[in-house]
């Protein structure tokens, strides 16, 4: 029993799940795994799936209100221009702001640096009934930190296991974790950065540091390889999202969210009051 | 120079602004001040204005990224079923979750009660570039608190002045405050509560306490009168929103947000880097 649009030949949660042994260098960012449709048809599918997501999100929120402490956490990791912001706006944005908690994790503040790297992560976890969105995350502490040698290996090395343990605890306490590693090709990244430089309404998205990071691409690939190899677990698997086609990455992550919400087997919470008695009270009030 | 849809004969920020001397008992929740259109035409207008709001919200966010510390705070107050949640979902929800901070203020927690009533408010204020949404607010501390005698008059009485001073400080530090008092009639409220009792997917929105509050309507009217009389200031005026017609209240608050954002005279932040030099760097990277 599935309501997956017919353009999908495979369930995104199966075909996009990171398979042990997969090499990051073999990931093709322009591919559209499991999907036979094209861009022209994607808009209508996206609109319908936005609605589907919004309906499930509301049901999750309703359950939270009724005391269910389960939540969903979407973790978005990817190089600059991979499209994390677009996922937030065009996929998560279909939900109700009341039940969405967005957090962007940039360079840590002085206060954050004075704490354990998971300190700011804990503070941003979604309460029951909510969807949390991490735009970058604790994984920065084994990515940028590793690539730029911000701390020595004996500091970042134990973090993989620590993160697995942290996420296990999180999953055990009722949070469904959806981790998306978003891959954009260097060519497509160049086009997207160039567009930001061509349009004054996009300047604010441009950071000269992004170009510097391009030069470190091989080191990032190595860091992403370690991340996928070591932190894709049963309780919190990684999904590999090809992102050169924005319409595909949005459809794919939309489906991953829908599937995660469906896996919670939600239903509308029953009344915790006597419906008929309340109808009488209301008629008289 | 205005882009207000032609169905508006008056600017919402003018016609809906609370006028000293107005009696709460004279507010007609079914009216549609300043708007000549009807429900059938409202959907297209709403869709267009959602886009307009989203564009301005992105520009505010861009400026925040560029270091502008200005923000916008939408305060929603109203009796149960007035439609606060609908405003969040259908108006604010058109914006990007990345730049929206929603906070619902319910019965204070034990920790919150141990602090000054503005403590939890301060914690939820929007950072620069963000839109904060308060679903209920510090005004609960002169509404429900007053109606239910939760603290004696000599405790809540000084709060009006205190709130004005707090909001003045907030406005002076760059936050544009849009306060909406949402009025629904007792008849319409009954219909909306009855609908929640008729639909299992709405049970979660129903609270037997809502019926109890109906009986206190005159006391709430009195408390709202004092609130409007005493806290509608030049730096943070109240807008009175008739809410029996949901489509009208949504259009109205959407325009108030657009007007508030336009009053900030935002433009896309200039590049803080050398655009041509970056184009060259990028071409070589």
Image (cartoon, coloured by chain):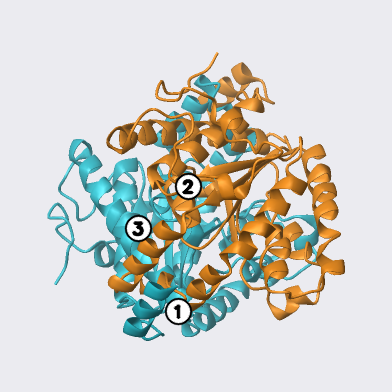
Chain colours: A cyan, B orange
Q: Circle 3 sits in a helix, a strand or a loop, which is it?
A: helix
For marks 1 and 3 on the same chain, the one whose residue lies earlier in the sequence: 3
Tell me if B25 is positioned left or right of A59 in this view. right
* Mark 1 crowdedness (10 Å alpha carbons): few <14, some 14-19, many ≥20: some
Q: Is residue B33 above or below residue B115?
A: above
For the point 54% across and 60% down, the residue is B79
Q: State the image coordinates of residue A11 (x, y, percent, origin top left).
A: 21, 64
Q: State the image coordinates of residue A12 (x, y, percent, origin top left).
A: 26, 61
Q: CA distance from mark 2 to mark 3?
A: 30 Å
Q: Are marks 2 and 1 in contact (CB under 8 Å)?
A: no
Residue A18 in view, yes or no: no
- The numbered mark at residue B29 is 2
Residue nearest the viewer, comparing A108 with A125: A125
* Mark 3 crowdedness (10 Å alpha carbons): few <14, some 14-19, many ≥20: some
> Which residue position is annotated with label 3?
A54
For the point 30% across and 42% down, the residue is A247
Tell me which corner region of the image, top left, top right, bottom left or bottom right, holds residue B144.
bottom right
> Which residue position is annotated with label 1?
A66
- The numbered mark at residue B14 is none
For the point 27% across and 36% down, the residue is B40
Q: Residue placed farthest to the top in the image?
A: B1
Dot in front, 1 or 3: 1
Q: CA distance from mark 2 to mark 1?
A: 31 Å
Q: CA distance from mark 1 to mark 3?
A: 18 Å
Residue nearest the viewer, comparing A143 with B160: B160
Chain on which label 1 sits: A
């Amino acid at each position: 029993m599935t309501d997956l649009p017919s353009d999908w030949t495979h369930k995104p949660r199966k075909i996009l799940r990171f398979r042990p042994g997969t090499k990051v260098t073999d990931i093709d960012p322009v591919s559209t795994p499991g999907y036979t449709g094209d861009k022209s048809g994607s808009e209508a599918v996206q609109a319908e799936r936005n609605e589907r997501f919004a309906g499930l999100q509301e049901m999750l929120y309703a359950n939270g209100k009724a005391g269910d402490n389960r939540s969903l956490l979407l973790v978005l990791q990817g190089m600059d221009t991979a499209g994390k912001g677009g996922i937030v706006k065009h996929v998560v944005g279909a939900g109700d702001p009341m039940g969405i908690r967005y957090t962007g994790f940039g360079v840590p503040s002085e206060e954050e640096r004075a704490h354990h790297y998971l300190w700011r992560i804990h503070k941003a976890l979604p309460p029951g009934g909510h969807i949390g969105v991490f735009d970058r995350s604790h994984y920065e502490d084994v990515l940028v930190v590793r690539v730029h040698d911000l701390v020595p290996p004996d500091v970042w090395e134990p973090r993989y296991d620590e993160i697995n343990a942290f996420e296990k605890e999180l999953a055990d306490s009722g949070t469904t974790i959806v981790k998306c590693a978003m891959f954009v090709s260097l060519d497509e990244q160049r086009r997207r950065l160039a567009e930001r430089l061509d349009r004054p309404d996009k300047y604010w998205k441009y950071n000269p540091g992004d170009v510097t990071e391009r030069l470190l691409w091989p080191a990032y690939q190595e860091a992403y390889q370690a991340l996928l190899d070591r932190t894709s677990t049963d309780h919190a698997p990684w999904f590999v999202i090809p992102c050169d086609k924005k319409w595909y990455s949005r459809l794919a992550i939309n489906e991953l969210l829908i599937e995660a919400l469906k896996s919670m087997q939600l239903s509308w919470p029953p009344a915790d009051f006597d419906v008929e008695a309340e109808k009488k009270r209301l008629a008289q009030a």
